[in-house]
C-alpha cells in the first residue's frame, strides 16, 4: 500500500512511523508512507496555500489549486470520477463521517491512500465536492489540524494489513472488535504495595478464569462504555 500525506507540516510526521508495528510494516515492504509539503504545489513566489473566505469572516481557507495539483501528481487524477478503483482520497475534517474500526478495515484494502490534512479554518469546499472520496473525522472534539487525525487513521489501518501482526493476534482481535471492552490484565507481583491481583487469576483454574474475564469485561463495559451494550 502507498500512503501519501498532504500537509503544510511534513516535519510533524518525521519520526511518527518509526516505532512498533508501523515501523515493522514499512520495513517489510507492506506499506510505504510519505509526507509531502503542500507548498511544493504552489506556483507563486511566496508559496501561498490559503486565502480569505468568500463572504467574509475570520481566518483563512486553503485554496483549491495546490491541493488539486498535489492529488493529480500523486494519483494521476484530479477528479473523484476519474480516480482509479483502489485509490482513495481522504480529507480529514471535523465535518467528516466518524472514523471507526469498520472504516479502517474498508480503507485497508486500498492500493493507494491520499490523506489531506486541513487546518483550523478549513479547506475550499470544492476539494470535498469534486476530489475527495472520503471525508473523515476521528471524533467529536476540536483539533488544531488534520495531522493528528491522519496519524490515527494510518495507525489503525496499517495494523490491519495482511502480515502486519502475528497471525494469532489478528485472529483474536477480529472476535473482539465489535463486542465488549477487554478484560483487566495483571502480572507479577501478586501483591503490589498491598494492592492484590484477583486471587482467581492465580489459581490455574481455567474455567473459573474464563468466567471471571467475561464478567469483568461486562462490568467494565457497563461502567465505561454503556453505549456498546445498547
Ligand atoms: C467544527 C469546528 N469549526 C467551527 C468553527 C472550526 C474548526 C476546528 C478545528 C475547523 C477545523 C479544525 C481542525 N480540525 C481538523 O482538521 C480535524 C478534526 C477535528 O478537529 N476533530 C476530529 N477529527 C478531525 S479530522 C480533522
Image: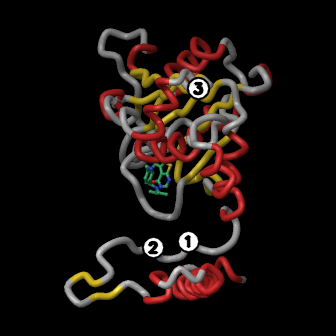
Residue 73: quadrant of the picture: top right
Q: Which residue is identified by label 1? A: 182
Q: How crowded is mark 2: few (under 14 residues within 10 Å), some or many (20 or more)?
A: few
Does the residue tagged 2 have its C-beta within 8 Å of any atom of ligand 1? Answer: no
Closer to the camera: disc 3 or disc 2? 2
* Real-space CA distance between mark 3 and mark 1, rounded to the nearest whole angstrom: 28 Å
Q: Is mark 2 on a helix, strand or loop?
A: loop
Q: Which of 197 and 15 is in front in this view?
A: 197
Closer to the camera: disc 2 or disc 1? 2
* Real-space CA distance between mark 2 and mark 1, rounded to the nearest whole angstrom: 9 Å
For the point 56% across and 88% down, the residue is: 219
- Tag 2 and tag 1, C-beta contact below 8 Å: yes
Q: Residue 133 carries which label?
A: none
Q: Which residue is identified by label 2? A: 185
Q: Dividing the image into 4 quarters, which one contains the C terminus?
A: bottom right
Q: Earlier in the sequence, mark 3 or mark 2?
A: 3
Q: Is residue 103 left or right of residue 196?
A: right
Residue positioned most to the front: 204
Does the residue tagged 3 have its C-beta within 8 Å of any atom of ligand 1? Answer: no
Q: Residues within 10 Å of mark 3 (few under 14, many from 20)?
A: some
* Real-space CA distance between mark 3 and mark 2, rounded to the nearest whole angstrom: 31 Å
Vertical arrangement, residue 140 with respect to residue 63, above or below: below
Q: Nearer the viewer, residue 210 or 184?
A: 210
Q: Which of 149 and 72 is in front in this view?
A: 149
Q: Residue 30 carries which label?
A: 3
Amino acid at each position: 500500500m502507498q500512503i501519501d500525506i498532504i500537509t503544510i507540516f511534513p516535519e510533524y510526521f518525521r519520526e511518527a512511523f518509526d516505532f512498533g508495528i508501523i515501523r515493522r510494516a514499512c520495513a517489510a515492504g507492506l506499506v510505504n508512507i510519505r509526507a509531502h509539503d503542500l507548498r511544493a504545489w504552489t506556483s507563486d513566489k511566496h508559496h501561498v496555500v490559503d486565502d480569505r473566505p468568500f463572504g467574509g469572516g475570520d481566518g483563512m481557507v486553503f485554496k483549491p489549486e495546490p491541493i488539486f495539483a498535489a492529488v493529480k501528481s500523486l494519483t494521476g487524477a484530479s477528479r473523484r470520477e476519474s480516480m482509479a478503483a483502489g485509490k482513495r482520497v481522504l480529507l480529514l475534517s471535523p465535518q467528516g463521517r466518524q472514523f471507526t474500526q469498520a472504516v479502517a478495515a474498508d480503507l485497508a484494502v486500498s492500493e493507494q491512500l491520499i490523506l489531506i490534512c486541513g487546518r483550523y479554518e478549513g479547506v475550499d469546499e470544492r476539494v470535498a465536492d469534486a476530489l475527495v472520496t472520503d471525508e473523515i473525522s476521528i471524533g467529536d472534539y476540536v483539533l488544531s489540524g488534520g495531522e493528528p487525525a491522519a496519524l490515527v487513521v494510518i495507525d489503525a489501518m496499517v495494523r490491519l494489513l495482511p502480515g502486519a501482526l502475528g497471525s494469532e493476534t489478528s485472529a483474536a482481535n477480529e472476535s473482539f472488535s465489535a463486542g465488549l471492552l477487554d478484560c483487566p490484565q495483571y502480572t507479577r507481583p501478586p501483591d503490589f504495595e498491598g494492592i492484590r491481583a484477583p486471587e482467581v487469576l492465580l489459581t490455574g483454574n481455567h474455567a473459573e478464569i474464563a468466567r471471571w474475564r467475561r464478567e469483568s469485561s461486562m462490568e467494565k463495559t457497563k461502567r465505561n462504555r454503556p453505549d456498546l451494550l445498547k
